[in-house]
Amino acid sequence: MAEPRRIHAEADLCRDCQACTLACSLYHEGKCGLSLARLVVDKDMARYTFKITVCQQCDEPACIPACPSGAMRRAGRGVAVLVEEDCIQCGACAEACPYQAIFYHEAQDRYLKCDLCDGRAEGPLCVEVCPVGALTLSDPIIKENL
């Protein structure tokens, strides 16, 4: 199975336009809403700094073995995905994520996680719409047999 690419976030470039979060929510949910995005842009207005939280597509993701229902699993291209219809809303995946990149949406009583827009030929929409290049898509890590 091919290793997934990763979204790299360069918070120093971010200008808090929220184009990434709005595009993400529109693509996945059919409507714009910051709380419906699979990534979060946090801001410290006192320092005018930002932190962008998005799934790191770990080589050995803690979220997958933590999920008791099997809802968290690898998709065809190696991307760790959350299959909503199999999710029992226990939160074990979110607790296991060292990056805090699995988000609970209280109003919809469900968890959200970046899937790199799995199935979208052009790749993650958030990367495409970022006007300042704060989000980029990295190449998969190639491991050589030694």
Image (spheres, rainbow, N blue to C red):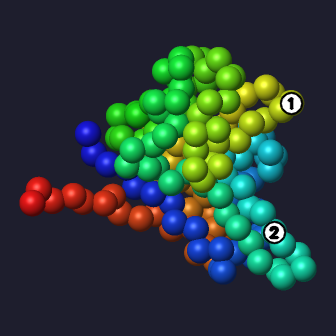
Say few, some or many: other residues with alpha carbon within 10 Å of mark 2 (under 14 / 14 to 19 / 20 or more): some
Residue type at numbered disc 1:
Ala
Please tell me in which quadrant of the rendered image residue 85 appears. top right
Label 2: state its secondary structure. Answer: strand
Quarter placement of the C terminus: bottom left
Residue type at numbered disc 2:
Lys
In the rendered image, residue 45, in percent from the top left (x then y), is placed at: 88, 75
> Which of 115/94 is in front?
94
In the rendered image, residue 27, in percent from the top left (x then y), is placed at: 65, 43
Label 1: state its secondary structure. Answer: loop
Q: Which mark is residue 107?
A: 1
Kindly identify the residue that appears in the image at 49 percent across and 40 percent down: 62
Query: In the figure, is residue 135 to the left or right of 118?
Result: right
**Circle 2 is placed at which residue position?**
43
Query: In the figure, is residue 20 to the left or right of 136?
Result: right
Q: Look at the numbered discs 2 and 1 and tell me whether their residues touch, using CB distance below 8 Å.
A: no
The disc, 2 or 1, on the residue closer to the chain's N-terminal end is 2
Kindly identify the residue that appears in the image at 69 percent across and 75 percent down: 14
Query: In the figure, is residue 54 to the left or right of 123?
Result: right
Quarter placement of the N terminus: top left
Please tell me in which quadrant of the rendered image residue 52 appears. bottom right
Say few, some or many: other residues with alpha carbon within 10 Å of mark 1 (under 14 / 14 to 19 / 20 or more): few
